[in-house]
Amino acid sequence: MRKHDQRVRKLLGGQEGSMAPLAVAAAIAMLIIILGVSEYMRLVITAAGVKDALESAAIAVVNDNYNEVYHGIREGYAAGYEPDDTGFMESLDYGDVYGRMCSLLGLEEDGDGCVCRNTAGRLEYRIKNLTVNVHNTALASPGGTYYVEAGLTIEIPVCFGGKIVSNLSIPLRVKAAYREKF
């Protein structure tokens, strides 16, 4: 054991700057870790912003349907129907979710979806495959919930060192419900 200690002291002792390569390697490792964490945070913040906009658009669809909801206060249900000559007819408004999201997020339409570009013109993310389902409660069936489900796929380019490494594809789903207050 003493012989080993003497070798270590001989290697490390009296050599000025021998720790410089280790310090440089540690600094580079920390820089790579910081870059990775900042890219991860960019992806999380972007996905959260798009999900918030999708929730807002789904809530707007529910609110747009408010005037078409038959208020069955005595029966205790609400549904998207309007009276006609023979009874009631289903009346649903699916809204312009892509249009709302484009205005909320500053997107531009691009073929099969919408894209967001940064000031340099590079792609920040793309949203596509939008689905909007309005679930109507059956007429005269108390206890049902009138709600809207919306979903889409967001594709975000993953960058490292200024180059796109791959695309991250995340399916986002939200649900907004209409509930009678009185």
Image: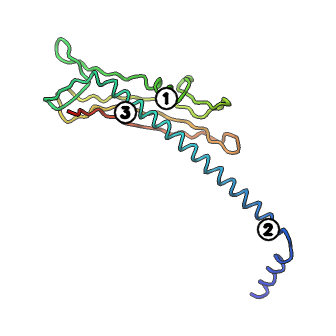
Q: CA distance from mark 1 to mark 2?
A: 53 Å
- In this picture, is 48 found above or below 73? below
Mark 1 or mark 2: whose residue is earlier in sequence: 2
The chosen color scheme is rainbow
For badge 2, the amino acid type reads Met
Q: Label 2 crowding class (10 Å Cα cut-off): few <14, some 14-19, many 20+?
A: few
Give whichever of discs 3 and 2 has the lower sequence position: 2
| Residue 179, x across and y down, in percent | 26, 34
Q: Name the residue: 66% across, 29% down.
A: 121
* Residue topped by disc 1: 104
Quarter residue 1 falls in? bottom right
Read off the residue under disc 3.
149
* Mark 1 Cα shell of 10 Å, populated few (<14), some (14-19), many (≥20): some
Instruction: Please state the horizontal and vertical placement of residue 178, each as a whole percent of the image.
Output: 29, 32
> Of marks 3 and 1, which one's residue comes earlier in the chain?
1
- The quadrant where residue 95 appears: top left
Instruction: Please say if 89 is above or below 16.
Output: above
Residue under pointer 2: 19
Left or right relative to 7: residue 139: left
Q: Whole-percent x and y of residue 145? A: 26, 34
Q: Secondary structure at mark 1?
A: helix
